[in-house]
Amino acid sequence: MRLALLIPLYAIVAIMVVYTIRHYLFTLNRLFGRHRQPYVDVGTASWPRVAVFVPCHNEERVIAHMLDALLVCDYPERQLVIIPINDRSTDGTAKILAEYASKFPVRVAPFVRKGGKPGKAAALKDAMAASDAPIHLVFDADYLPGRGLIKQLVGPFFDPETGAVMGRVVPMNVNKTLLTRLLDLERTGGYQVDQQARMNLGLIPQYGGTVGGVRRAALIDVGGWRDDTLAEDTDLTFRLVLAGWEVVYQNRSECYEEVPESWPSRIRQIKRWARGHNQSLARYWWPLLKRPTHVRRWKVVDGLLLLGVFAVGPLLLLGWALAIALYYMGVPLSSGVYVILAVAMYSTLGNFAAFFEVAAGARLDGSRGRIKLLPFLIVGFLVSLVSVSWATVAKIATFWRRDDQRWEKTERHRENGTVIP
Amino acid sequence: MRGKSARREVERARHFEAMRTRGFRGGLIVPHRSMVGLPWTALRFLTTLALSLGGVLLLYIALPSLGRLWQEIFERARDFLGLAAPLGDQLWNLPGGLEFTLPVLAAGTPLPGDGALRIATIVTLLVFGLTVLLPVRFTPLRYFLRLLAIIQATAILFFAFAADPFPYRLQDHVFVLLSAGLVIMALVPLVLGLTLHVFDLALWKKLLLTLAILAHLAVFIPLQVLVHIWLVMHGTALVMPVLFLVFGLLLDILVFVSFYGWALSWRGELERRDLPPPAHLAAPIRGRGRGR
């Protein structure tokens, strides 16, 4: 009986150690390594035609800001078309989109969905046919792209091997609540260090579904957008990698987003991510492990670890449960086991970035003050740990239900009349 | 290319390299934060190595004094907390032939009776109930209290139904926490070497932080254990699992992470002093209130 508990506990501790080493190496690489930022800041080129898709479901609070920002982007006007996807909105989104379409008839071409499956993936799948532009960029409606962002995101596509590009997400409502400050730290660790290190090392940077884009030909090559997933971004990343396309991360291409300001909103968001990401884990771990000839061995290892980030939560919770059981059985565990389980609690779950990775990212950002919040990571981690574990268990318990694709929309907090600088 | 001409070429290359970062009116053009990194120098490697090994060596030399300090803290706190138990010591054999004397309070382990179990059950249910009533903005606190309630519930179930006796005495609890605390103290200089000394902080700051964490833990750990002893003596062994699992090593690591976060918020040697913080952190967006 003891052995039956000890073996899985040590296996879990070993997994935590592997992730800790992985993130330590990423941190060292980001601090001291040579950075790969292909085709960044190209100013003059023969720019390809680009379609910018903005899925919107009841986005009246934010969509006008987004469109205003896109309309002043530094990109040849004739080569850029903005396609806001009005996905069954019931608020004032349709009216706002109609206003912009009449004002900018050539540049803004709304796509209207009145039925069909709910969710971003389904919306993108339907809207894909609306443009034959060779590059499809995707933004969430609450994002605020800077003037040079479109060129920065399109630049890497000059490399014909590039299938998808991802930019950096930067929260803009950082000073609102403790949660927004913690999410800012989480994003910093995830993008400034984790994604850039994976890019530097030639591993698998993740296409994150927004502030990024995909080559239309690559998208068609891998079968288009899938609407049977809650994480179309992770799903697409792995399909592209398995098909031999490169995914590029551009740390320089920053875009502001609005992070959840309330805990229920955050819990819904991370539960959706966990369900979608674990869905991709179930789909792609085996094809990746079989390793197509063009995928390097280290890329496979990184890909498996990347697929597993949301499985870490339930595993860690199981590790603590096993430790408690063994404690009552009087089995002496070494201090090291407890230390590793304890250290793992000072992480962020979305990318399982450990505290030193988050601190390094914030320091590189030049905003040292917020690193003092580091010990509070455990606060956000605890909530994420339980939420993600709950979502995973619920998904496993209902695995036979193929219709379990309920899309939880992330709440917007921007107030009406907010002036964006 | 040889001799003078090679030297001239190198100087020329250096000059152009310097010009690349020289801005209007001689100012320095700093790279964007997405491209900034840290230079790794032989000196930083040597200081990292020296600080890490020096920290471990310092702890090794201070072991007898640390033992005496913990003994002293136990002796004074025993009277202060009214813990009527004789104080002794226990020799702990460390790897490499080292020895460390840990203080031992020869106190019995009070086991819970029916009354204590009933009270604990009511308190646990109340705490769990409270989590339902707390507003959503206290979600992390709700989760934390639920976690405590669940672990406490396992203790209640164990003492109420388990056939085997509780496998720990209070002395075992004390020994494990003190010895694990010492292990953490020994790891501090090494972990700092891997995660903090690689940054461009001044040497004296790194040294100060190492000493500050070690000094803090040297006082914190025995006090933490004494609070545990007091709580167990008043709350019976029922509280031991929660104390061990939630308020044991997890708290020690919190101390480390807090110091670490504080230290990394200090100014680095290579940092420009006149740079404003990134725009999104400098000021909230107009039209919004301050944090709730």
Image: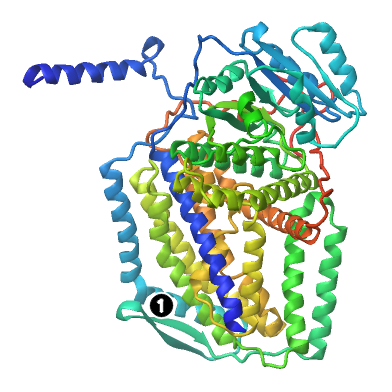
Where A12 falls versus A53 (above or below)?
below
Quadrant housing residue B106: bottom right
The total of numbered circles placed on residues is 1
Q: Which residue is mark 1?
A: B67
Image point (78%, 7%), residue name: A104
Q: Residue at x 73, y 16 (%)?
A: A82
- Within 10 Å of disc 1 (Cα), the crowding (few <14, some 14-19, many 20+) is some
Q: Residue at x 79, y 14 (%)?
A: A109
Quadrant of res A211: top right
Task: Name which residue lies at 82% across and 12% down.
Answer: A100
In the rendered view of the protein, which quadrant contains the C terminus of chain A? top right
Q: Position of residue A28 (x, y in %)?
A: 41, 45
Q: Is residue A354 visible?
A: no
* Relative to B223, A410 lies left or right: right
Q: Amino acid at mark 1?
A: Gly
Q: Tell me the quadrant of the picture where the N terminus of chain A can be found.
A: bottom right
